[in-house]
Every structure is written in C-alpha cells, then in structure tokens.
C-alpha cells in the first residue's frame, strides 16, 4: 500500500487486546480507538511490544499517525497504521472527572452504540459493523475456559517458525524481505480465557457467552493467575457499583462472533454516572 494512501489522523486509544501471533506480521495487537469526531477505528496489524519507547501509547491517550484503510480486511473500521510515525499526545487526565471527560470523546458518535448485542449483530450483517458498545444488564457468571489443544499446538508451531525466520533474516541481513521483527520476543500463551455470561437489553436476549481479550485483564491473569484476574473482573462487573459498558469487537474469520476487547467501568457514585 503506497504512502499516498495514508492520512495523518488523531486517535484516542480505548482498548488493546493481548498479543497474538501472525504468520505474516509476527506478533500483533488489535487496538481500538476513536477519531476526533468519535468514529470507531481498529488498528491492525501493530507490533505493539516492538515499538520504540516514544511510540508506545497508553489507554485513553491521544496519538497522531498516518493511517489507511486496510484493503485486506473488509471490516469498515479496520485501518493500517504507519507505526514508526506515531506521535503521542495528551493522556486524558486521571482526575475525579476523568470518566466524564473520556465519555465526551469516546461516546460522541452514536453510530457504534447499540441497545443490545442482537442489534449489533444485525448491523454487522447489514452494514459490516465490527465494533460496538453495549451495556450489560445482568452478569450471570464469570469463569475461566480452557482453550482448545489445537490452539496451543498452533501457537507453539507458529512461534517456532517465526523465531527461525527472524534468525535467518538476521543472518542474511535482508532488512527489506519481511515485516517480521529482527528478533522474536518471548510471548506466554494463555491456556485459559476469562469468560463472561451476561444478558443485554434485547427483548429476546437468551444470554451471551464472551471471552475477555482486554490486554490489562489478560496480563493480570498471566502475572498473578486466574483467581486474581477473576476477582478483578468480578469487581468491575458489579453493576450495582459500576456503570459498566463493554467494547465489543468481532473476529475477521467469524464476523457474527464478538468478544469483549475492552471494559468501561466508572463508579456509579461518580456524579456523572
């Protein structure tokens, strides 16, 4: 994709998923953001852990970078980014009113806010929507779910292959051959995923069962184990205490299937919620 297809765009980062391996791009992170007018954007691929220190961004931080529609991904929100040109900007301040300031930006555009998962899926089928915000009405269960054995084998095989290819590229000094990093960093495969059973406001909602892919939750799981991570999820999914919303994103290969890619959870005691 030529440089002329990229346009400098200001984005507010709202979610990052735990790193996954890609045969083509190495290690990738799916990142969700909103533009200045509140439109949702998916940045993919981005090798977040391989960015320089001046390019790595935080959640609820403004960045400016050239982006272009990802022509290999027909989801309307999916864009590529020129990561080496990322310029970090303001982080929405951590004050008692931070959720209100963030809300003004994150929820400015109503086109990706849905009353139910069923409404989001209908929009996906009609218009291709692949990102959406939905408010949970009831949390039925929070549990860990083992990933299939084939996922583990696929990860191990892919990591071995990528590591070998990176080694070959270093030996050949072929810097223009591939977009893979010069050296693969170790990446822990999470054998389980935290899963939430919940209901939305859909009149015929029979309940939903979704994985949490949010990097912060997955990293807590990796560092401190399932119990600590589940306790944190249970805390912020206490709907009596928190005005929780789910940032939902679908899978490229399975467009009707959505997962929780980020969590919005201001305390209800906040005067704005």
Image (cartoon, grey):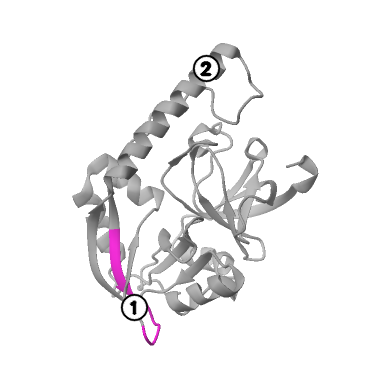
Question: Residue farthest to the bottom?
Answer: 203
Would residue 224 be found to the left or right of residue 112 on screen?
Answer: left
Q: Residue at x 62, y 65 (%)?
A: 38
Would residue 131 be found to the left or right of residue 240 on screen?
Answer: right
- Rendering coords of residue 21 (x, y %): 45, 39
- In the image, 186 versus 147, the foreground residue is 147
- In the image, 10 versus 167, the foreground residue is 167
Q: Which residues are magenta?
A: 195-204
Q: Residues within 10 Å of mark 2 (few under 14, many from 20)?
A: few
Q: Earlier in the sequence, mark 1 or mark 2?
A: 1
Question: Which residue has dot 2 on it?
Answer: 168
Figure quadrant of residue 11 = bottom right
| Dot label at residue 45 | none
- Rendering coords of residue 65 (x, y %): 68, 45
Mark 2 lies on a secondary structure that is helix
Question: Which residue has dot 1 on it?
Answer: 137
Q: Say if mark 1 contacts mark 2, CB within 8 Å.
A: no
Give yes or no for residue 202 being in the magenta stretch.
yes
Camera-side mark, 1 or 2:
2
Q: Residue at x 45, y 21 (%)?
A: 164
Would residue 245 be found to the left or right of residue 23 on screen?
Answer: left
Cα–Cα gap, marks 1 and 2: 52 Å
Mark 1 lies on a secondary structure that is loop
Give yes or no for residue 86 being in the magenta stretch.
no
Q: From the viewer's perspective, is residue 242 above or below residue 18? A: below
Question: Residue farthest to the top?
Answer: 171
Q: Residue at x 67, y 51 (%)?
A: 71
Q: Residue at x 35, y 57 (%)?
A: 212
């Amino acid at each position: 994709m030529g440089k002329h297809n990229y346009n400098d765009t200001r984005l507010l980062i709202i979610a990052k998923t735990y790193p996954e391996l890609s045969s083509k791009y190495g290690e990738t992170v799916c990142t969700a953001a909103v533009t200045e007018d509140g439109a949702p954007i998916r940045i993919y691929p981005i090798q977040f852990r391989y960015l320089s220190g001046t390019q790595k961004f935080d959640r609820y931080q403004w960045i400016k970078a050239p982006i272009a529609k990802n022509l290999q991904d027909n989801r309307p929100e999916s864009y590529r980014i020129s990561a080496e040109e990322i310029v970090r900007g303001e982080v929405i301040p951590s004050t008692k009113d931070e959720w209100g300031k963030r809300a003004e930006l994150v929820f400015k555009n109503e086109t990706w806010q849905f009353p139910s998962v069923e409404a989001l899926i209908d929009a996906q089928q009609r218009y291709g929507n692949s990102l959406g915000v939905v408010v949970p009405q009831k949390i039925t269960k929070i549990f860990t779910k083992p990933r299939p054995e084939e996922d583990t084998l696929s990860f191990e095989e892919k990591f071995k292959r990528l590591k070998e290819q990176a080694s070959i590229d270093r030996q050949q000094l072929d810097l223009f051959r591939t977009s893979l990093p010069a050296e693969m960093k170790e990446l822990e495969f999470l054998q389980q995923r935290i899963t939430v059973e919940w209901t939305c406001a859909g009149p015929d909602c029979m309940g939903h069962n979704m994985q949490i892919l949010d990097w912060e939750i997955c990293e807590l799981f990796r560092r401190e184990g399932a119990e600590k991570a589940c306790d944190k999820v249970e805390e912020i999914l206490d709907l009596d205490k928190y005005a929780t919303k789910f940032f939902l994103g679908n899978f490229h290969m399975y467009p009707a299937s959505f997962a929780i890619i980020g969590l919005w959870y201001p305390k209800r005691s906040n005067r704005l919620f």
